[in-house]
Image (cartoon, helix red, strand yellow):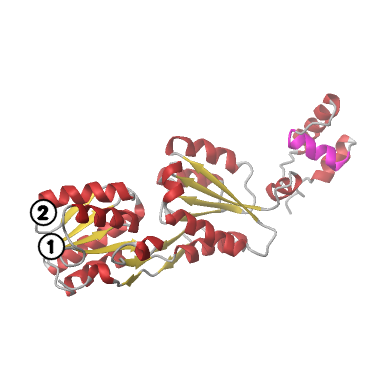
Amino acid sequence: MSPKRPTLADVAAGAGVSKAAVSRVINDAPGVAEQTRARVQEVITRLGYRPDPVARALAVGRGEVVELVVVEDAAAFGVSPYYGRVTAGMLQELAGSNLQLQVHLVDRSGVAALLDAVAGTVSVGVVLLNVPAEIAGEFYTRCDRVVSMGVRAPAVPFVGVDNAGGAYAAVRHLFDTGRRRIAALHGPAGHTDADGRREGYRRAVHELGLPDLAATGEFHRDSGYDLTGRLLHREPALDAIFAGSDAVAAGAMQALADAGRRVPDDVAIVGFDDSVIALCTTPPMSSVRQPVEEMAAAAVRALVKRQLAAHWRGEFPAVLRVRRSSGPA
């Protein structure tokens, strides 16, 4: 039988102090004499005591915490409906419990250092969003209470949507409504969601005998606008666009309007996400629905119920919602 793990009470008894004093030492809080602090540290080292992360969170008043780590710049985070939907889904799952949500917004250069800090204090678990594969994989070797939104690295548990299937359905729909020069506005290479949608588009145009008319950028409105202008210059006869996100599709619609092209009469549009953006464009946008709130809630549920193991996945279907932006040619 393995030896009993030392507790906070064991440290307090060994040092001859209260558990509250030990907690203050562990959390580097004031109110403990230096001599007492040194004695507590000596007992911690001798016993090999390691603070329980949940208990530590409770001790500093945080309660049990689910952490969301997002790699994105602040401007994009503030305007993208996707991040709001993720947060809403997580909060819906946490409602009625004593659990808290803590959000960390960081750029790519700072995410490794942030995760180093999170690994030492994690309580319930961590949801990763846009964290690069190599960093997500390394973090998982140190903390197995983690779920990635989208496939990020081998073995790392994830929730995701059928990106390839959704893109394929979008292109097939455009073809069935009479479109024959269907361009794609892809998200960044190496982004797993963008890669899946790129795969679905390429499979569809190959099977249908259509040309591959594509451009690659970011999942931002400005990127959709710029890429569409370039595509129109290069492929003036294009009659449909599949965009890798609704934000990109909205930028494409603005570029088409500025070029004197009507949607859907001249160029049909299908986005991806089925976010609020799709309902606010003129005309309303066809879009592949990604159930973001349900996906985020599933990630939290798996963490809270300790359902995770290596290679765990929660996969959701992608369903095309047809609106006026992709009417027949």
Point 45% across, 62% down: residue: 292
Give the residue number, with chain letter if any, for mark 2: 235
Residue 193 in the image: x percent, y percent? Answer: 35, 56
Q: Is residue 9 left or right of residue 299?
A: right
Residue 230 seen in the figure: yes
**Distance in Å between CA atoms under marks 1 and 2:** 9 Å
Residue 249 in the image: x percent, y percent? Answer: 29, 57
Residue 48 in the image: x percent, y percent? Answer: 73, 38
The magenta span reads: 18-28
Point 33% across, 57% down: residue: 245
The disc labelled 1 sits on which kind of residue?
Arg
Give the residue number, with chain letter if any, for mark 1: 181
Nearest the viewer among 265 and 94 is 265
Task: For the residues labelled 1 and 2, say whether their Cβ atoms are less than 8 Å apart.
Answer: yes
The quadrant of the image that shows the N terminus is bottom right
Q: Is residue 52 left or right of residue 190?
A: right
The disc labelled 2 sits on which kind of residue?
Glu
